[in-house]
Amino acid sequence: MNILITGVAGFIGSHLAKKLIAKNMTVIGIDNLNDYYDVSLKERRLEMIGTQNFKFYQQDIADYEQLHDTFKQERPTVVINLAAQAGVRYSLTNPHTYIDANVKGFMNVLECCRHNQIEHLIYASSSSVYGANTKQPFNVHDSVNHPLSIYAATKKANELMAHTYSSLYQLPTTGLRFFTVYGPWGRPDMALFKFTQAIINEEKIDVYNYGKMMRDFTFVDDIVESISKLVNKPASINKDWDGAKPDPATSFAPYKIYNIGNSKPVNLMEFIEAIERKLGKQAIKNYMALQPGDVPETYANVDDLYRDIDFKPQVSVDEGVGQFIDWYVNYYK
């Protein structure tokens, strides 16, 4: 099976490529290696993947002609779209970047899938789509029409665009709402990376909403295990779908949405304490108000995921934080 992964030099993409190659699949990787954060970290991730059963193209999914040429040449059977401009706070000051990568780029991926007989498109959505929803845990069968950031709006747009292609062209699409992914090789703009770096250097960490935040932290190994199990489970038609009572997570078309989260929210202060325990150092905390675009709490209902692939994320925060810090200390010496 040939699997094309966009965003392959990213945090989740690199872990996923390594996982699928270990399952004897061939991976075609695409990444533009942009400078949103340290490019050398992305290059090291590519080295970590290796060269066996892996072919890499440095290109931007926003360039349709180049992307379509790669599809025609490599003829993948499954596409996993992880390429995106990430980050809620960055979207407040750089909104156009999100439209280019997350909307225009995803449109190009859909068109390439349509014209190249792709059997299954899996794509990254985000827990951010739940926006102003307060009903807990967040459930894929609830509507998500009140995003709080342009990042969240682009991810909701991806789900709507995917449904259109599932409906018009019978393209099986599976959207994955990731919940605060963390672990080794993680992104420098994410809390765990920034907190670890600051505590080691005895610098202040910014603690938003005065620490009154809950996050459904999900270890990267649990994310990629879930994706790998979904590769061979293309979305199917829900024969009981009713337009009078529309279920947002399924459709009359081959379309499905899943949450992928640990389903065990952790208080932000407990998360910081786990880092402090592992490092043996206290954080210097700078308490701040809730930032625009942020939500105070995330909590994933993963019943559908467990039912369909007999797996739910399970790595504890203490174990996951420990693995990240071991990697960080070794990587940065």
Image (tube, grey):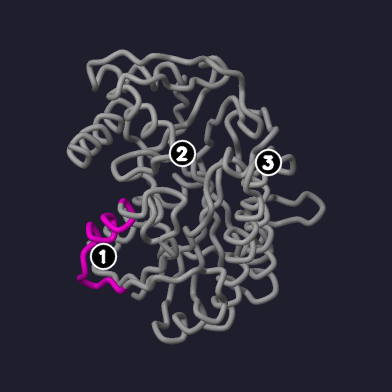
Residue placed most toward the observer, 313 or 285:
285
Q: Which residue is mark 2?
A: 261
| Disc 3 secondary structure class | loop
Question: Vertically, is 120 above or below 279?
Answer: below
Is residue 117 at all visible to an observer of this figure? no
Of the numbered discs 2 and 1, the one sitting upstream in the chain is: 1
Left or right of 157 on screen, residue 9: left
Residue range (magenta): 41-55
Task: In the rendered view, tell whether residue 132 sits above or below residue 57.
Answer: above
Mark 3 sits on what residue?
Answer: 142
Q: Which mark is residue 177?
A: none
Disc 3 versus disc 1: distance between alpha carbons? 35 Å
Separation (CA) of disc 3 from disc 2: 16 Å
Q: How many marks?
A: 3
Q: Of circles 3 and 1, which is in front?
A: 1
- Image spot of residue 264 (x, y percent): 44, 28
* In-image side of 243 versus 79 (left or right): right
Secondary structure of the residue carrying tag 1 is helix
| Mark 2 secondary-structure assignment | loop
Residue bearing the label numbered 1: 21
Q: Amino acid at mark 1?
A: Ile
Residue that protrudes farthest toward the right in the picture: 244
Whether residue 5 appears in this view of the structure is yes
